[in-house]
Amino acid sequence: MLDHDRVLECAMSLPALPPTVYQLLHLVREPEPDLLEIARVIELDPVLTLKVLRLANSAFFSRGKPVGRIKDAVLRLGAGTILGIAVGAACQALTPRFIPGYRLRSEEFWHHCVTAGVAAELGRVYCRQDWSALAFTSAVLHDIGKLVLGRLMTEEHLAFLDRAQHEGKQELWQAERQILSLDHGDVGGFIATYWNLPDCIVDGIKYHHHPQDGFDLLSSVTFLADGISHRVCQSDRSHWEEWGDCDALHYACQALGLDRSGLERWCQAVHNQNVSQGTPVGNGRQRA
């Protein structure tokens, strides 16, 4: 068993987010975010400026029309996506090249997370229910708890997780709860709270495996974005098929006004986007 207090202590040892993130967070929380002021904040951070321009000129966002000014990039991406880029960039700096507790390389981990973020954005057209612009941030950060648990997992823990998944037919997060009484979603929610992120993001991260226990629509959005990313990044049809009679899937689809046909089209759209970007396909052993 992992010590519960040690996990929380490790989570609280993470450095605070950069001042730029909190400036953006303050602006994004306004009822009518000032996009020009957001652009001015980004321009003071050269690394973030590059990342924002890169995403704004990606195939998904650009539609063949490149932009060269941050002001135009912010107008194209929107405040919620900008916050996701800033927080994600800060978290990437905390990620080791290899996450031992989950046998994941950093690029696999972030490819899955960013694909989930793109899925959260793409899904709006397939659902009758709209959702917060902060969905991109929630989806990009949904597995952030793994950065803490990954530091603490031993080979003995990994062997237990493998047995629980392959012999006990449990999902990874359920196996985590057996050895800790919480899972990486719980830890991620704690980190998001510690960083003073909005409650809807905390909710989306914490309940991304069991959205029926959440309080905000982002828990359902993040759940579906995570599942779609697994199918796209890992060609993981078994993960998809296991959803067939999943209570969480039925709940999330009903909450968002999504039918099976829409879900398939949503997944195909993310797949097409993934292929068009030419991004590498992850192949991590652990599913989450």
Image (spheres, rainbow, N blue to C red):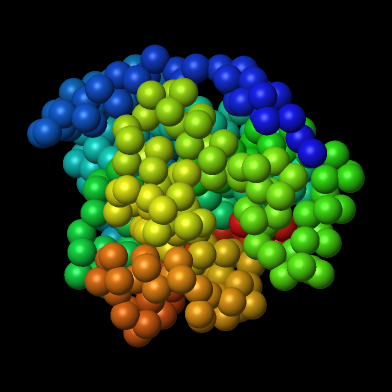
Q: Residue at x 76, y 68 (%)?
A: 168
Q: Is residue 178 visible?
A: yes
Position of 112 with respect to 267 (left or right) is right
Q: Nearer the viewer, residue 128 or 207?
A: 207
In the image, residue 65 lies at what x, y percent?
26, 55
Q: In the picture, residue 41 is in which quadrant?
A: top left
Q: Position of residue 263 (x, y in %)?
A: 38, 76
Quarter of image, res 143:
top right
Where residue 207 sits in the image (x, y, percent)? 46, 50
Would you say 195 lies left or right of 253 here?
right
Pick the front one: 111 or 276: 111
Q: Residue furthest left?
A: 32
How many marks are shown on the rendered structure?
0
Which residue is pictured at 75% across the width and 64% down the height? 165
Where does the N terminus fall, quadrant-wise?
A: top right
Q: Residue 253, relative to residue 6: is it above or below? A: below
Q: Nearer the viewer, residue 275 or 241?
A: 241
**Position of 33 relative to 60 (above/below):** above
In this orientation, does residue 74 appear?
A: no
Residue 151's place in the image compared with 281, above or below, is above
- Find the residue positioned furthest to the bottom: 261
Quadrant for the C terminus, please: bottom right
Question: Can you give x and y, in whole percent of width and height, for residue 246 in the image?
Answer: 50, 73
Please give the name of the residue rendered at 51% of the width and 56% of the height, measured from the top-left corner: 209
| Image point (87%, 53%), residue name | 159
Which quadrant of the view contains residue 119?
bottom left
